[in-house]
Image (cartoon, rainbow, N blue to C red):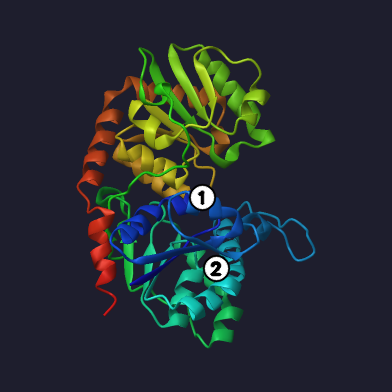
Amino acid sequence: MRMLFVAGGSSGVIFSIIPLAQAARHAGHEVLMAGPENMMPTITSAGIPGVAVTSRDMLETLFDEAGNRRVIPADLHERYLFNGRQFGRYASWCLEGLLPLADRWRPDVVVGGALAFAAPVVARYAGVPYVKHAVDMGEPRTIDLAAAAELAPDLRRLGFHDMPWSDLFVDICPPSLRETDAPPAELMRYVPYSTKGPVEPWMYTKGRRTRLLVSAGNRVTPDYFDILGGLVDKVGRLDVELLVMAPEKAAGHLGRLPDNVRVGWVPLDVVAPTCDVVMSHAGGTTVLGTMHYGVPQVLVPYLPYARGFTERLCAYGAAKMVPPEEDSPENITQACKEVLENPAYRQRARDIAAEMAGLPTPARTLAAVERLVV
């Protein structure tokens, strides 16, 4: 069987779909993963054949045709619409390479990340089943509607009257954290994945100190260095080991660091099991990867779509939220102390990890995809 996986425009939304693609290859299926040119190293380093379908970068969606930066709305609803149109615009660029690929390779099924809106379009174009694959714990549906509106000219050109529905939805969110009105789904265990590099002993070995991991994510911009610097200063005074996942350049901006602070590349799937708490920007793969290992979290949901699942995880008792407008080093440090000192956070995090471990593996979930192809 030929399985075409369609990836989104950043590594964060690719990591989640890699385990199922790897399972398909291990089962003997022919697999290709289509995505943007700048994401080919991420895809191919996972042992998956990658096909670049656009040379354009996801960040280009922030600019109009004249090169002017679009104004990001402050209103939450308008921000969802803005983001949806971004994803729709990007999907339109991807279709330029995806449609010819479908003509030449003729897939039997298309699997697309939830935010890769070109996937359902190319599946209908090829006349094959479409599998929607979650990339985190759920996005506002307003994003889907706005993406469909942006893709309207492409849909009309192809003779489609609406966005195609999925034939199967693979969800990686554990049942206890799914939205009450979540659609029916084939539930699958989330398997953590991250960029690879040489693993050093300190990454998988915990010392006597409490270990606190900070994932800076895409927030490592000039305006965020002050927050990181303040956090390092505040937490550095505690008897903890502080690890900061960030580009190496961040260390230079933070100046001389205490002995108990490390800044740089940190493989989450190796380090997370050794941590006592993980503080992050609430990126989907970071949150899910941390949940997988039963580690409590402190979350600052900078991206609007992350607010919903952040609140659900906090209501469950496995995390503490710091609103973005209150993300001072003092507030973040206080939240970390609360999570560390209250064992209930750790217990609830372990409960979630146990629930995730009981879900079907990607290899078992693959069987549901195979049944779509007759």
Q: Can you give x and y, in whole percent of width and height, for residue 162 in the image?
A: 48, 81
Quadrant of the snapshot with the N terminus: bottom left
Q: Is residue 132 above or below residue 345?
A: below
Amino acid carrying label 2: it is: Ala
Q: Residue at x 44, y 62 (%)?
A: 114
Disc number placed over residue 146 in the picture, else none: 2
Amino acid carrying label 1: it is: Thr
Q: CA distance from mark 1 to mark 2?
A: 28 Å
Which of the 4 quarters of the picture holds residue 154? bottom right
Of the numbered discs 1 and 2, the one sitting upstream in the chain is 1
Element at label 2: helix
Badge 2, how many Cα within 10 Å: few under 14, some, many 20+?
A: many
Foreground: 86 or 59? 59
The residue that disc 1 covers is 42
Which of the 4 quarters of the picture holds residue 318? top left
How many marks do you count on the picture?
Answer: 2
For residue 314, say whether it is visible: no
Element at label 1: helix
